[in-house]
Image: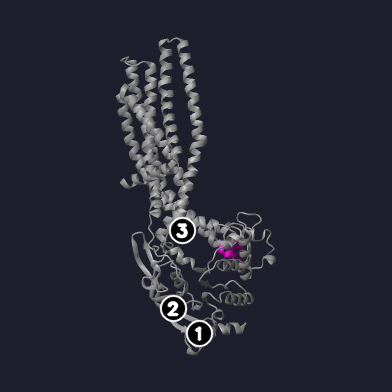
Amino acid sequence: MKRKLSNISWLVRFCIRTSPRLLFFNIFACVEQSLFVFFEYTIWIGYNLNAAENGTPFSQVALLTLGVFALFVVHQFIDSIYFEWSFERIKPSLTFRLRRQIYEKACQVDLSCYDDVTFYNDFVLSTTQTDECIERFMNDGKDFLFELVNVITYFSYLLAVDRIGLLLAAACSAVNYFSGQRYARLEKEARLCKTPVERERAYQHRVFYLHDYAKELRLHPGMRSQLSEDFDHCNQKLNTINRKYGPKLWLYGFLKGYLPIYFMLYAIYLPYLLYRAMVTHALSLSAMVILLAAVRRMIKRTGALVGRLPRFAYIGSFIEKIRRFLDYEPRLISGTDDIHDEWKHLTLSHVSFSYPDSNFAGRINAREVLRDISLEITQGQKIALVGYNGAGKTTLVKLLMRFYDPDSGVILRNGTDIRSLKLDAYRKEIGAVFQDYRIYAATLRENVVMDICTGERGETYAVEQALHRAKFNLAAQKLKYQVDTPLTTEFEKDGVDLSGGESQKVAIARTLYHSHELIIMDEPSSALDPASEYQLNQELKELARDKTVIFISHRLAAAKDADCIYMMKDGRIVERGTHGQLLDLGGEYCKMWNLQAQAYQSC
């Protein structure tokens, strides 16, 4: 309970920091609305009934009616501002600010977090439930405050005029609290059971409408059938969950909705009022009507208030995940040392690394990927990392870029441990083209610059030069707006969907646009035809004449001219040397070369 209250308190403080004036106006408007409702339905109607019953002069009632009408106009004016402007404005403001915090944290968390299923599921839940969380909190918070003020007002009123009615309302609150707690707990359990199934069903839904899968689904009708079966299976799971929780939810919903109001009010309290009015003559008819209405409203508002508490606990469970994500402290910490000297060499000494299978509590199991890696990369050198899939090549360069820290061993830049250097400054020296590069729904210019663009002539020239050097032919592509043409057709009707090879050239142009000391090419020609691959390799050699380059490749033809080739197998460097030296050695590299040579010859 303490943590749940802490979660709600955290969100309240977040709201105050984000939009304090709007929030306080919302509170004022909600309190005003509650007090006016009490005044209208209890004080004013009670006065009119009593006036009619006791023969109060009509002129007096009419004069007071004009005053109440003026109050009503002011009340409606405040309500209009509240519902049509203030309340609707604060929700997107809060959502925007919370999403910004989540996005900023997403860029800070360790890359290893994406390998952690528990963390990633909480991350997905944080991003997908933000809007719903804010929507629920604002709506339930508004209703809670409205009902709280109502309960306090009617409590004070009944305490003064009829304590029996107050005791009855308290009994109803106890029933509401019990059934409401059970209802909310079951609702939360049902939601947690449904979430992974609904995520799976949403994936199947995306597969059927996204452009990425359209061609393959038409070529493989069996996959369509499999996806349809999976979709049906998910629906069956959801139906099973609904059958499990539905009857219990109905029972507790019936208890909290029917028993307090209809039984206790009309079977107990109304006969009590009738007895006082008809037998003992202790109540007037107007007083009986007002008390019945007041206790009814007290019961409903108390029940609604108690019912909101479990809903806040439900919201708190999602806030908990968001807080855990936002409170996550990266294990990969930036150093504090600035970089002033020129990049000269990078040394790996006895580096080992394992991908952790962990949760927030820490590592549970480890999957070793690199073992006792030692190598040195000097300025201007051309290095090739080769080997079969799963050898650890890509993981090794991720350690070089300090996406991960090694479990043991050290990586040195000019003799300094890279963990002591400022992370952004260190990474700024490295340019990379990954095999799993991405093209963004932005202009071609923005996809190359990968930063805020100025649109200036010098920038345009540099972008065009980078594209030209990456063998991306602007004229041949017939781009309507040249470098300002939107890529992908997801949001722009004039957008362009590039082929795999052309997209890869754009990814390469990103690296060529910036001046990096070390360039990493992770399968840079994997999507290119042989002629384009040859041209690109020759171009990269020319462009990187004075740069340090690390090639990662399955195609050994791209690596044979490297100054040093490292053959990797099972997370180890098993051979190193030039192309000729490794062929003479007759080991793993020679076998791989001969296999690829036979494949080319057979063609």
Identify the image quadrant of the C terminus. Answer: bottom right
Can residue 291 be seen? yes
CA separation in Å, label 1 and label 2: 15 Å
At a point 43% along the width and 26% down the height, the residue shown is 36
Residue ID at (42%, 43%): 15
**Which one is nearer the viewer's eye here, 148 or 327?**
327
- Provide residue 567's location: percent of width, then percent of height: 47, 81
For disc 2, the marked residue is 376
Q: In the rendered image of this protein, does residue 69 appear above or below residue 535?
A: above
Place of residue 446 in the rendered image (x, y in percent of width and height, measured from the top left):
58, 59
Q: Which residue corresponds to mark 1? A: 578
Residue 457, position as x, y percentages in the image: 64, 60
* Precedes in sequence: disc 3 or disc 2: 3
Determine which quarter of the picture holds residue 148. Answer: top left
Image-quadrant location for residue 279: top left
N-terminal-most mark, 1 or 2: 2
Residue 501, relative to residue 483: is it above or below?
below
Nearer to the camera, 439 or 132: 439
Q: Which mark is residue 8?
A: none
For disc 3, the marked residue is 107
- The amino acid on which the numbered mark 1 sits, given as a three-letter code, is Thr
| Residue 145 placement (x, y as % from top left) | 40, 35
Question: As drawn, which residue projects farthest toward the front?
Answer: 340
Dot 3 and dot 2 residues touching (CB under 8 Å) = no
Q: Amino acid at mark 2?
A: Glu
Say if the magenta span includes residue 221.
yes
Q: Quadrant of the N terminus?
A: top left
Q: Which residues are magenta?
A: 214-224
| Residue 368, visible in the rendered structure | no
Between marks 1 and 3, how big is the CA–CA gap? Answer: 39 Å
